[in-house]
Amino acid sequence: MKREPLIRHPKNPILTPEQMPFRCYTVMNSGATLFNDEVLLMLRVEDCERRTRFVIATSKNGIDFKIWDKPIQYPMNQTEKFVGGRLHRFDARITYLEGKYYICHASWLDNYGCVAAMASTTDFIHFEPVPYTSEPSNRNVVLFPEKISGLFARLDRPQGTDGSGHIWVSYSPDLIFWGKSLPVKELPATDWNRAHNGAGAIPIKTEKGWLEIYHATAPTCSSTNYYLGAVLLDLQDPSKVIAAPREYILAAEKDYECMGQTPNVVFTSGAVELPDGTLNIYYGGADTRMCLAQTTVNDLVEFCLNSK
């Protein structure tokens, strides 16, 4: 029997709304990193007004988490201050780069749509916003963990008015001015990644290329389903695809992935490689609860290289 590329953890879901420090509706789509020898998750938590808060949770084993008592007091950047009105932030990604942790996330601005935003921190208590990051409409911003040819690099998903879009790569000398943008255009066209192709976890550098775990959607007769896929990108030019399997690595199948705020969703914003080589992929189930799937970097690289 062919081995599955990802194995769901038997304790799934590992975090639920009932475990949060305040009454809330959902917990999902967390950024993930190693911090002070622990796994740290920056959780997207929607309260019962449907406002999103960022909440920190930490774990020594990457499975059982201690949740911080209060949501993060997160600052506004210049774009958010200028536009004003209601502000909805979500789906953080965390990149450790040059001594700082950079938080990339989406910001929904009233009357303008979705933009990419960024801030840095060293302690996950105090945050320094990057003044400007993108125009609308853009989301799923993922900062590479090292510079490429002397420039910061990011993956993102510019999108049309229908919410569709594809993964692009852009470069910056200072995290403010971005350009040299190209699409990652060689992903295979399959029946599971028809739309909403977006970067998920922070790219992992391997000898074979940048390993990126991404999401995509496809319609069924009753809903639009989310899937996770894996791809290897060229180390010097991430717009070039080294290997991209036609098979997904995870689909919504379990009750906790199929029933909730948004049915049939598996969505990752972060993965952490543990000291023993286990790769923990943290993902939201049905936009309602946090889940965990495990593999190794080597296994996913081999899956990319050897799958049709």
Image: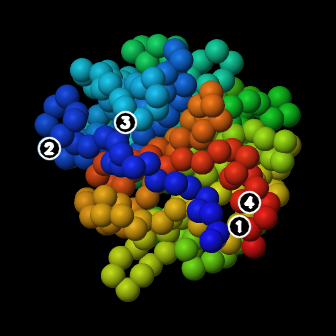
Instruction: Tell me if 169 is positioned left or right of 223 in this view.
Output: right
Neighbor class of circle 4 (other Cα within 10 Å; few <14, some 14-19, many 20+) is many
Is there a contact, CB below 8 Å, between mark 4 and mark 1? yes
Instruction: Tell me if 257 is positioned left or right of 283 in this view.
Output: left
Q: Amino acid at mark 3?
A: Leu
Q: Amino acid at mark 1?
A: Pro
Which residue is farthest bottom? 221
Quadrant placement of the C terminus: bottom right
Q: CA distance from mark 3 to mark 4?
A: 29 Å
Q: How many marks?
A: 4
Neighbor class of circle 1 (other Cα within 10 Å; few <14, some 14-19, many 20+) is some
> Which residue shows up at 39% across the image and 42% down it?
90
Instruction: Tell me if 237 is positioned left or right of 214 in this view.
Output: right
Which x, y percent locates residue 84?
Answer: 31, 35
Q: Is residue 286 visible?
A: no
> Which residue shows up at 43% across the image and 18% down it?
124
Task: Please give the residue where the numbered disc 2 appears in the rendered image.
Answer: 48
Q: Amino acid at mark 4?
A: Cys
**Dot in front, 2 or 3:** 3
Q: Say which element carries label 3.
A: strand
Task: Please give the residue where the numbered disc 3 appears in the rendered image.
Answer: 43
Q: Say which element carries label 4.
A: helix
Which x, y percent locates residue 94?
Answer: 53, 32
Q: Say which element carries label 2.
A: loop
Quadrant placement of the N terminus: bottom right
